[in-house]
C-alpha cells in the first residue's frame, strides 16, 4: 500500500508515523512492518536529514506454516520372510485338512 493512501486513510502525518524511529533505517523498518511503501517525494529523507535516496523498503512475505506431514500407508511389496518350517496345511471349506494329492474341488464325496 502506498504512503499517500495510508496517511489519508489513517489520518496520520509522516512525523507521527515515524516518531519512534531514531534514524532513516528504523523509519524504513516501520514502513516494512506495516507493509506500507514509503513516500517517494523525499520527505522521509528530509525528516531524518539524509539527502540520498534510500532503497525501497522490503515488504516481508507472509509467514505460512508448513503443512503437517502426511503419513503414507506402508504397502508391503516383498514376500514375507521364508521360514524354516513347512507351510501350514490347507483346510477345505469344512475345516478338514487335506493332503496335496487330494482334489479340493471334488463335491461328490
Image: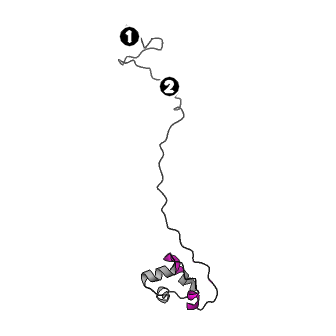
Q: CA distance from mark 1 to mark 2?
A: 31 Å
Q: Nearer the viewer, residue 7 or 85?
A: 7
Q: Main secondary structure of the magenta part?
A: loop
Q: Of label 1 and label 2, which has the lower sequence position?
A: 2
Which SS class for mark 2?
loop
Instruction: Point out the frontmost of discs 1 and 2.
Output: 1
Which SS class for mark 1?
loop
Q: Spot the residue most to the left.
A: 94
In the figure, 8 relative to 83: above or below? Answer: below
Please say whether residue 93 is one of the residues in the magenta stretch.
no
Q: Spot the residue most to the right.
A: 52
Q: Residue at x 49, y 89 (%)?
A: 15
Q: Residue at x 50, y 25 (%)?
A: 85
Q: Which residue is mark 2?
A: 85
Region rendered in magenta = 29-58
Where residue 6 sits in the image (x, y, percent)? 47, 80
Instruction: Give the quadrant of the C terminus.
Output: top left
Q: Which residue is mark 1?
A: 107
Q: Residue at x 63, y 89 (%)?
A: 51
In the figure, 22 relative to 56: above or below? Answer: below
Q: Nearer the viewer, residue 72 or 101?
A: 72
Q: Spot the residue most to the top.
A: 108
Q: Residue at x 61, y 82 (%)?
A: 54
Q: Nearer the viewer, residue 2 or 59?
A: 2
Tell me, for residue 83, which label it has, or none.
none
Where residue 84 sits in the image (x, y, percent)? 52, 27
Q: Residues within 10 Å of mark 1 (few under 14, many from 20)?
A: few
Q: Nearer the viewer, residue 64 or 85?
A: 64
Instruction: Report which quarter residue 93 is drawn in.
Output: top left
Q: Residues within 10 Å of mark 2 (few under 14, many from 20)?
A: few
In the figure, 41 relative to 93: above or below? Answer: below
Amino acid at each position: 500500500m502506498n504512503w499517500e493512501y495510508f496517511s489519508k486513510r489513517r489520518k496520520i502525518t509522516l512525523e507521527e508515523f515515524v516518531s519512534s524511529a531514531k534514524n532513516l533505517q528504523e523509519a524504513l523498518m516501520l514502513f516494512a512492518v506495516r507493509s506500507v511503501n514509503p513516500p517517494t517525494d523525499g520527505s522521509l529523507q528530509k525528516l531524518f536529514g539524509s539527502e540520498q535516496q534510500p532503497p525501497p523498503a522490503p515488504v516481508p512475505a507472509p509467514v505460512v506454516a508448513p503443512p503437517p506431514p502426511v503419513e503414507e500407508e506402508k504397502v508391503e511389496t516383498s514376500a514375507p520372510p521364508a521360514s524354516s518350517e513347512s507351510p501350514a496345511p490347507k483346510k477345505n471349506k469344512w475345516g478338514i485338512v487335506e493332503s496335496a494329492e487330494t482334489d479340493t474341488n471334488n463335491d461328490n464325496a
